[in-house]
Image: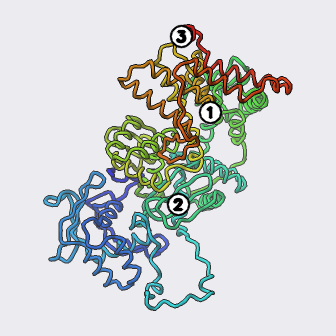
Amino acid sequence: MDSKDEQHRGNDSRNDYKGTDLQLDKNEDNEEVGNYKIPAFFTLIEYEHLIKYDRFRSHKNKDIQAVFEFYDDKDKRIDYVKESFKVMIVEEIYHNQRLGYYHDQDKDMLRVWKGGYANPDYEDYVSWQDVTSFIEDMIDRNVYLSIPLKPLPTTQKQQLNLFDMEPVEPSQNNKEKQSFTMPQNIIDAVLSEGTVEKESKMKIAIYFSLDQPVEKNAEFLKKLYYEGSNGFIINNRSICYKWNSDGMQITWGDGIINAYDKQTLTWQDVAKGIRSLLDQGRYISQNELDQCTDYEYQQASENLWYMCQDMDFDKTDHMMELRQYYHKGFPDGTAQMEQLLKDKEFYDRTISALTAFNDDYQNHPNYMSHHWRRYAPDRVLPVIQRLTMPHINFKAIDYKGPQYTYFVTQDSIDSIIASQHRVHQKYDTLAFFLNNKDKKERIKFLKDMWGISGSSDYDSNSKGLRIKTGSYNKPYAEVLLKWKDVEQRLSYLIERDKYLNDEQKAGIKDYEIEVLARNIYSFFCRLPLNNPRPYNTQLEDKDKNNEIKTLLKDPSNTANILDMMQIALLNTAEFGKNYENMMKYFNRVQDFYQGTYTLFNEKKKPIIDTPYEPANNLFDSLARSLAEFAQMYDPYDLLISMKISKMQYKIKRIHLMILKDYKVLSNL
């Protein structure tokens, strides 16, 4: 992967390569966190990558961790680590930087550098004790192996080897495993971050100042946070956290997906923690608290403006007074409304008008043109009502803002490259990967699929996929993944069945039918108009596809579609790309008829022993359909049981399928 050095929101000497080496002993709670040297010109993630790079080492990382599990003796661990580094120059390109190390036997230290070996930009020497201590710390944080093993056993457990193990007493066997918990100062730091949105902490402080029950606070947070992840470094340790509708997960390392253990907080836990921080003055700065009142009125006026923007003024005469400010535009109109809302008479008139509009809206939802639920009157009314509710006056005189180094977590990377919000793109990618094993073809597919595009979370171009965290213009962390890295990660997720969620897996069949319907339409759309088609040519393209999907629910209709395709192929020259595509689509429909159709390289047993043999002309196709109809229905029984409608429907379907274009029959 190719990345930009992780950025932070404040001043941080970790990004100053000319600063002193860091040697951190204790965290804010005076707990031991590691006593080792890290050269200051490395970011933590760069140094981790360099020390973990074991391609040319005598002992691989998994072997080192296994040895550490059996030997508590520091000297033995140091000797084993030193032995694993061969006396050779090793360099690796990481995040657009050339990093390297060399086992210097003369100095009995590990020489490390950034830049080229011959003329490095920065270099330093690290003792083997520091290297070993750093590896121990990475193991503790579950970031040493790509798939972490269990944490190192305690000293007492390490002293027990394979030869002196005794049967476990029942009392020990039944002992409950102690739950994993993060230090409270880490939890507080995570909760104090808010969401990736810049103003989220002000929104939270405003809502919590209403002194609502914890259940309402939790529901508010759940909607505000929605889904996402973030990561930063405290006291030389990477912390990552992820949130969704179930709550928030926190752990050490570069991503929740790689974590051996993690602590889960419900939204009520999060709400209680944030309220405690607000009461202690440790959540948000006093400067931001002083801005909360104006910000609340600003948000209220913008909600009113966007609501008016979505109103259909031709269908309703509600909110007449606000319309004059709406027509002044944004932000002039909203600025005037913001000031007027502080006037009691204007506020009362607005509440009265908005209440009446909301009551009428419940029976006439078409009063809103685009149905923007966020700015519907029943959503805007509570926002305006909260302006005059009593507010707690939180204080944060001694608040000190954090200065962390942030990074893009593996969870954020996976969310973007797995196209979590573009389900059809996920299906297209999965189908291509399962049917094409060539890496170059996959990389080309990804380049074409993503093209030149972007959002607040990513930018895509021919070089790769740049994933960002934070604001759109000034992300505080970003990473550039080359397309080969994207392909490699997607392959990993697909092979381990982590690419689709359960809901997306359930939608595979509908997606395959959707693609098949598009294929059938593509088969016929370029043919002369006198060719019969399995859809009404007067419909819009979307409705044509829907009609084809309806037909595919009945196998007899599928047979009729194959007849039409066969007739068209007999009248098409057997050269050119169009004919190749027509044959591909014809074979897919044939597979669908037999029950073996798949876009995802599945092995399916046919439900019909022999393939369907399509008719070569419309008369044979019509004869087959009429014969099938006669076998299925007895006209006398239908008349007796008053099932005329079903027979009429079948006749109508045959006419739609076979006799739709009278010109074809007359020409024949």
* Residue 522 against residue 227 in the figure, above or below: above
Relative height, residue 235 to residue 665 (above, below)? below
Q: In the rendered image, which residue does mark 3 sit on?
A: 668
Residue 181 seen in the figure: yes
Q: Residue at x 32, y 60 (%)?
A: 46
> Would you say the residues marked 3 and 2 are in contact, meaning their CB atoms lie under 8 Å apart?
no
Instruction: Give whichever of discs 3 and 2 has the lower sequence position.
Output: 2
Depth check, front residue: 562 or 144: 562
Q: CA distance from mark 1 to mark 2?
A: 74 Å
Judging from the image, the colouring scheme is rainbow
For the residues labelled 3 and 2, the Cα–Cα distance comes to 92 Å
Q: In the rendering, at what x and y percent does residue 364 appear? A: 75, 26
Front residue (pair 119, 169)? 169
Residue 20 visible (yes or no): no
Callout 3–callout 1 Cβ contact below 8 Å: no
Spatial separation of the CA atoms under disc 3 and disc 1: 27 Å
Answer with mark 3 or mark 1, whichever residue precedes in sequence. 1
Q: Amino acid at mark 3?
A: Leu
Number of the label disc, if any, that sits on residue 150: none
Q: Quadrant of residue 607?
A: top right
